Image (cartoon, helix red, strand yellow):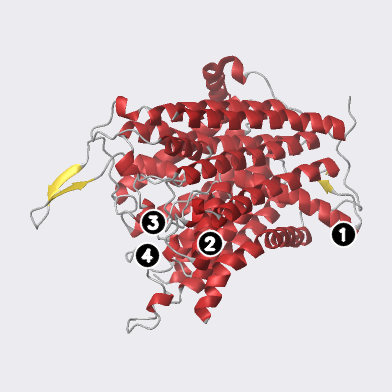
Amino acid sequence: MWIYFLLGIVTFLLLFLLTEGIERWEKWDRKLP
Amino acid sequence: MNAFLFIVLIVGLSAVLSWPLGRYLKWAMDPELGQASFFDRLFHMFGGRLTNQAQNWKQYSLSLLVFNLVIFSVSFAFLALQHHLPLNPDGKGPLEGSLIFNTAASFVTNTNLQHYSGEAAMSYLSQLCALMWLQFVTPAVGLAALAAIARGVAGRKEMGNFFLDLQRATFLVMLPVAVIVAVLFLIGGMPMTLQGAAKVMTLEGVEQVIARGPVAAFIAIKQIGTNGGGYFGPNSTHPFENPSFLTNIISTVAIIWIPMGCVWMFGRITRRIHHASIVFAVMFVLMSCRIVGAVYYESAPTQAFSKLAVEQTTGNLEGKELRFGTAAGPLWAVLTTSTSNGSVNSMHDSLNPMTGLMPMIGMWLNEDFGGVGVGFINMFIYLILGVFVAGMMVGRTPEYLGRRVESHEVKLAVLALFVHALFILAPTALFAATDWGAKTLNNVGAHGFSEILYEFSSASANNGSGFEGLGDNTIPWNVATGLVMLLARFIPIIFPLAIAGSLAAKKPSAESAGTLGVENLTFGFMLLATILFIGALTFFPAATLGPIAEHLQFMG
């Protein structure tokens, strides 16, 4: 059962990484420092 | 009642009532300095340090994700341990792991897709503490995100505080409106009790167990929060969940009311009420076209009855509650899929093929009027694209409410749209081609394909309604739809927050003759065309394999 709980946690971790990635991409896209 | 009058009454009443609601939503979610200070002081007291700091888009998004991770964990724990916990008078047993994951993901994402039957599987504690409280806070999350985006679009550098907005949405919007609607439902005859199931002796001398519980409270927030998860398995076709024609009217208005009010809230926060009027009109036209289509196609009898010597003038009564008539089913089907509500008062699997297409279109477009808060957020993505395309076509600077729309915002908007389509079409193809889907179908051919397509459309749109005819409580279905619900809920919130943050950081440009206007009918038509072209290009091939193919087969 708890393997499914971990699946949910990993999905949220991916979403955290996506949020971080968007900010880094924005800086790279706009050539910001 | 005449079907036309019934529809005009429901939709018209909702639209009229949404105007004062929009004013209230603005007051609650974005008070002017000095207004609502009593409530904000209370919320600061409850929230402590979490509510003190104004946040940019990234901080707001991370707070939103952290909160949802916590509620996912709490909900999962309640469901996993229900057989050890109190308020379980009927001795409900443990649930299977993948079903717990699916249910927790479903209720955390405001989807409320149910691969279980509530009265058979859930204890009262699970219904109240794992499921019902999420029906209050998850629409509040959507409303909070919309308020933040509106502030960003209005040019404010800081987009508010998520934890403060969440409390405003929960305690000033969801809770009071739910209490009022619950009282109306109680008057309409819904049960509200914590006693166990009633045992009665039938006239044949057999004992019958009748499930009941805190139904009125559950159903009120189910409808106003665009949740849709039923207390009972048959949802709003069950006589305790929708006892009369009066409760059917109240439910139908409650489904669409807050999503409509969100449009006016956006207009008031950005101080562009004319722009909001144009967007409201576009949403209204899209929804009305689908209502007309659904009622028209459902006025024909079901194919199975067409050669029988039975009354053929009453339309398709298969899968309908006869006490509500033929028109109430397709109207509800369109409204519930327009708004990511997902409750049903008729069986969507029994709709005529082209009627069944109308709810699917609602979930594919997912913006007229959409879920609480998130419906307008989805429309915001189309607005960015519409402004960009219109600007390119007429050679004017693409601007949205005084801020230039550049390639970065357009890339984010396209990605957000792409994610929604990807999460519908890719798993549909996978399940249609493998035993994961094929062996769970009760129908073959085009109708079977429609069942798979509908299920993933419902999961990705965070709608929660089911075409059914599908044995979907299996590990592949539970895991796949659970993942789709989680990703398709939060990615289309995070990207628009990033777009709003990006717009907020730009210098406002003065409007001139070269500025593309977004407060006139021309822009309304442009927005409508953008939505229709993108929607058709993305989903028409899938529609031809499902409901359209089935319709053509019936025509011979």
Q: Which residue is mark 1?
A: B393
The chain ID associated with circle 1 is: B
- Splitting the image into 4 quarters, where does residue B99 fall? top left
Residue B516 appears anywhere in the view: yes
- Co-location on one chain, circles 3 and 4: yes
Quick one: label 3 or label 4, which is nearer the N terminus? 3
Q: Which tag, 2 or 4, sits closer to the chain's start?
A: 4
Could you tell me how far apart the alpha carbons at marks 4 and 1 are, in whole angstroms? 47 Å
Q: Which mark is residue B320?
A: 4
The three-letter amino acid code for the residue at tag 3 is Asn
- Amino acid type, callout 2: Phe
Circles 2 and 4 in contact, beta carbons < 8 Å: no
State how far apart marks 2 and 1 are (Cα).
Answer: 38 Å
Q: Amino acid at mark 4?
A: Lys
Around disc 3, counting alpha carbons within 10 Å, would you say few (fewer than 14), some (14 to 19), or many (20 or more)?
A: many
Question: Do marks 2 and 3 share a subunit?
Answer: yes
Pick whichever of labels 2 and 3 is earlier in the sequence. Answer: 3
Amino acid type, callout 1: Met
Q: Residue at x 59, y 44 (%)?
A: B22
Separation (CA) of disc 3 from disc 1? 46 Å
Query: CA gap, disc 3 to disc 4?
Result: 13 Å
User: Tag 3, which secondary structure?
Assistant: helix
Quadrant in which the N terminus of chain B appears: bottom left
Distance of label 2 from label 4 (alpha carbons) = 23 Å
Q: Position of residue B197 (x, y in %)?
A: 22, 41
- Residue linked to disc 3: B248
Report the residue marked by disc 2.
B449
Mark found first going from the N terminus, 2 or 1: 1
Q: Earlier in the sequence, mark 3 or mark 1?
A: 3
